[in-house]
């Protein structure tokens, strides 16, 4: 298995040699579960088996985060005016 963490994000690559039953290699995307975590340890994706699946998952995540950013800013602005 290959594990890589960059900042607060990472991935785990699982290949044939890591498994009892032969499956296609896949990756799962992770985030750090707390500021104390040394590595990304909380899975945020299913097992992704192709570049297209990775792109689709990341594109959806970016869109959701952009929407969340707008909602959070509006909520904060409204609360500050009250």
Image: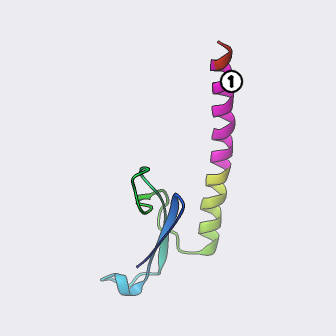
Residue 18, image x, y percentages:
35, 82
Q: Is residue 11 magenta?
A: no
So how many labels did they put on this image?
1
Question: For numbered disc 1, what is the local secondary structure?
Answer: helix
Which residue is located at x 58 percent, y 75 percent? 50
- Which quarter of the rendered picture does the C terminus lie within? top right
Quadrant housing residue 52: bottom right
Quadrant housing residue 39: bottom left
- Which quarter of the rendered picture does the N terminus lie within? bottom left
Residue 24, image x, y percentages:
46, 81
Along the line of sight, the residue nearer the viewer: 10 or 7? 7
Which residue is located at x 40 percent, y 56 percent? 37
Residue 8, image x, y percentages:
52, 57
In the image, farthest residue toward the left: 20
Q: Is residue 67 left or right of residue 4?
A: right
Which residue is located at x 62 percent, y 60 percent? 58
Span shown in magenta: 63-79
In the image, farthest residue toward the top: 82
Residue 38, image x, y percentages:
41, 61
Which residue is located at x 63 percent, y 46 percent? 65
Q: Which residue is mark 1?
A: 77
Along the line of sight, the residue nearer the viewer: 50 or 69? 69
Along the line of sight, the residue nearer the viewer: 67 or 79? 79
> Magenta part mainly helix, strand or loop?
helix
């Amino acid at each position: 298995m290959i594990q890589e963490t960059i900042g607060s994000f990472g991935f785990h690559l699982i290949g044939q040699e890591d498994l009892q039953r032969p499956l296609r290699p896949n990756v799962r995307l992770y985030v750090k579960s707390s500021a104390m975590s040394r590595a990304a340890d909380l899975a945020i994706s299913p097992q992704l088996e192709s570049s297209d699946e990775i792109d689709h998952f990341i594109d959806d995540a970016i869109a959701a985060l952009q929407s969340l950013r707008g909602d959070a800013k509006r909520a904060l602005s409204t609360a500050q005016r009250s």
